[in-house]
Image (cartoon, grey):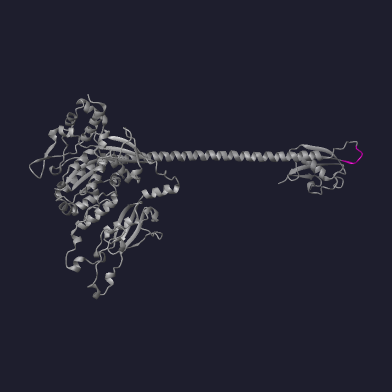
Amino acid sequence: MASNTDREMILADFQACTGIENIDEAITLLEQNNWDLVAAINGVIPQENGILPSEFSAETVQGPVFVPAATSSTAAVPTSSSTSAFRPVVSNRQVVERLSRMLDFKVEYRDKNVDVVLDDSCTVGDIKQILENELQVPASKMLLKGWKCGDVEDSTVLKSLHLPKNNNLYVLTPELPPPSISSQSSTLQESLNQTYLLIITHREVQREYSLHFSGSCTIQEVKRNVYDLTSIPVRHQIWEGWPPTVVDDTVNLASSGISYPCHRLSVSRRTSPVQTREQSEEQCTDIHMISDSDGDDFEDATEFGVDDGEIFGMASSSALRKSPMMPENAENEADALLQFTAEFSSRYGECHPVFFIGTLEASFQEAFYGKARDRKLLAIYLHHDESVLANVFCSQMLCAESIVSYLSQNFITWAWDMTREANRARFLTLCTRHFGSVVAQTVRSQKTDQFPLFLIIMGKRSSNEVLNVIQGNTSVDELMMRLISAMEIFSAQQQEDIKDEDEREARENVKREQDEAYRLSLEADRAKREAAEREMAEQYRLEQIRKEQEEEKEAIRMSLEQSLPPEPQEEHSEPQSKLRIRTPSGEFLERRFLGSNPLQVVLDFVASKGYPCHEFKLLSTFPRRDISQLDPCRSLMDLKLYPQETLFLEAKE
C-alpha cells in the first residue's frame, strides 16, 4: 500500500499526464486501479487511440491531441490529418523516469496575488526571479514563506520538495519600508497601472499608429518603439504634442502629464546635414558609424538617407542581416508585439492580419468578455524563424487577402515568436496557465519544422476552449476551411449566448422598471407624508400664534382691568355717569363712572372686557358718533355722557 506522500506524488503525476483537474475524479480512477499509475493512465488514455498517420511520410508519429477528459476545462477538435495531434501514451519507462511536471504557485505579497507556473525541475530561485519582475522587488530582499517543509534555499530543486500541484506561498520583505498610504502615492500607482493609447502621426508618410503603452513605460521606450515602426532613429525624431513640462525622456507616461486615456502626437525626421551640402562636397562625405547613447540599436549612414551600398558600390551588410521578430526574453508583451508587427511588415508587406498589441490576457478581454454580439474568436499565431515553412506560410497564406479579410472580420489575432528559447518558455507558461497542461504539452511537442502554428480559441463561461491547431504545412483553401469550420462552431455558441444575454437583459429591464415604479411610488408616498407633516406643522404654528395672541390679549386685559379706578358707590357725593354698553353678541355691560373720569377710563373698561379699541368702535345712538375717536383725555361730562348713556360696540372692518 502506498504511503500518503507517495499517493500525493502519484496523484500529481496522474493529473499532469491526463489533464484531469478534478481531484475527486482523479482519486477515484486511481483507487479503481489500486493506485497503479500506469494502469490508471492507460485506462483513461488507451494506446490504440494514440497513433494517427502523418501527411509527410508513411511512418506514424506520436503526440498529444485535444480530446477532453470527463471534467477537463480545455478541449479541441482535430479536423485534418495534417494538423492532428493526439493524446500522450505513457509507458512504464516514462513513469519511472518521472519527467518534469507543472506546479502551480499562488504567491501573496501585501495586496497583490501572483500566479506562477513552473516545471518541478526549476529551483526556488527561479520563482523569486519571476516574482522580481512581477512585484518589482529585488529577489535578494525576498523571504519566500509557506513551504510545508520549512525554510528552503534558493538553489533547492522543486522536485526534491515533493510538492502537490497547487501551492500557496507568501513573500516577506522585512528590509523594505512599508508602502506609503497617502492618496498621492495611491493615485500615482493607479496611473502606473493604466494603459494609455498614443495616436502617433508619421508626418512624412501621413500615416497614423495607434499604440497602447503602460503608464510605467518611459518616453524613451515610446521613442524606441516608434523607431521600430518608422525607421527614424531616436536622436533624429522631432516630436510635437508632448506636454511642455517634459524635458527628460526617462519620465514615465503616468508622470508626463499627457491626456488619459488617449493622447495625440506627431513625429518627423530631423533634416539631415547631408541634404544641405553642395554637390562638390558629397563626393568626400565621411560616413560615421554612431552608436546611440540612449541604447538604440546600431545605426549606420542610412539614418540620413544615405546607404553604404550606394556610396561604395556594394550591398549593405545590414540589409542582409535578418532582425529577430521579437527581442529575446521579452518581458513586456506589448513592446514585443510592436516589434513583431514592425518586423512582420518589413518582411512580408503591409497586407497582413492586424496583430493585437497587448498581453494575452488583454486579448481575452477584447475577444471574449464584451457583449455577446461583439465577441470574436481568438487566433494565436506562433512563429518560428528556423522553420522551413515560416516564409511560405506567412507570405502565401497568412498574407492572402481572403485570409486577412476573414481574420479581421471574425477574429482577434495575437502573435508570438517561438524562435528564442526564453520566449518559448514564457509562452508555454502562459499556455499552461490559461489553457491547461494538455495544450501546453501539445505545443511543446511540436517540432521546429511543424511551425508556424495557428491556435483557434473560443471563450466559454468557465474556460477557454482550443477548437483547432493548424500547422504550417497547409494551403490557403485548407486554412480558410479550418477558419470557417471554427467560425461555424463559434456562431452556434454565440447565438446561444446572445439568446441568454437578451433574456437576461429583458429580465433586468423588467426588474429595472419595477424598481423605478417602486421608487416613484415611494417618492409619491413620501411627498404626501411630507405635505401632511407640513400642513400639521403649519396648523400647529398658527395655533401657537393664536394662543400667544390670546395670551397677550389676556395679559393686556388683566393689566387694564387692574389699572381701572374702582367703581363709585351710588351714594357717592360726586356726579356719576351710568353707562350701558351693548356688545356685538347682544349682551350689555353696565358700570358707573365719575363724571370727572376721562374717556380713556371707559375705553380701558371696554378693552378689559375683550373689546380693544383697535378692533372695535364705541358708538353713541343719538346723535350717532364714534366715541372711540374722541379725545380720550376729556371727561365724561364734557362729552355729554352724563348722567347716563347707552352705547354699543361695533367691530371695525
If the image is split into quadrants, where does the N terminus sit? top left
Q: How many marks?
A: 0
List x then y, in percent, for residue 335.
29, 52
The answer to which quarter of the image holds residue 373 is top left
Q: Is 645 in front, or is 366?
A: 366
Q: Is 528 in front, or is 404?
A: 404
Asked if one can make out residue 506 in the rendered structure from this viewpoint, the answer is: no
List x then y, in percent, for residue 212.
32, 52
Asked if one can make out residue 165 in the rendered structure from this viewpoint, the answer is: yes
List x then y, in percent, for residue 101.
23, 37
Residue 58 is a magenta residue: no
> Which residue appears at 22% of the width and 33% of the height?
13
Q: Is 4 in front, or is 554?
A: 4
Left or right of 145, for residue 447: left
List x then y, in percent, for residue 199.
32, 57
In magenta, the rendered stretch is: 572-576
> Which residue appears at 26% of the width and 52% of the height?
337
State the residue lying farthest toward the left. 58
Task: Considering the whole magenta stretch, tell me its main secondary structure.
Answer: loop
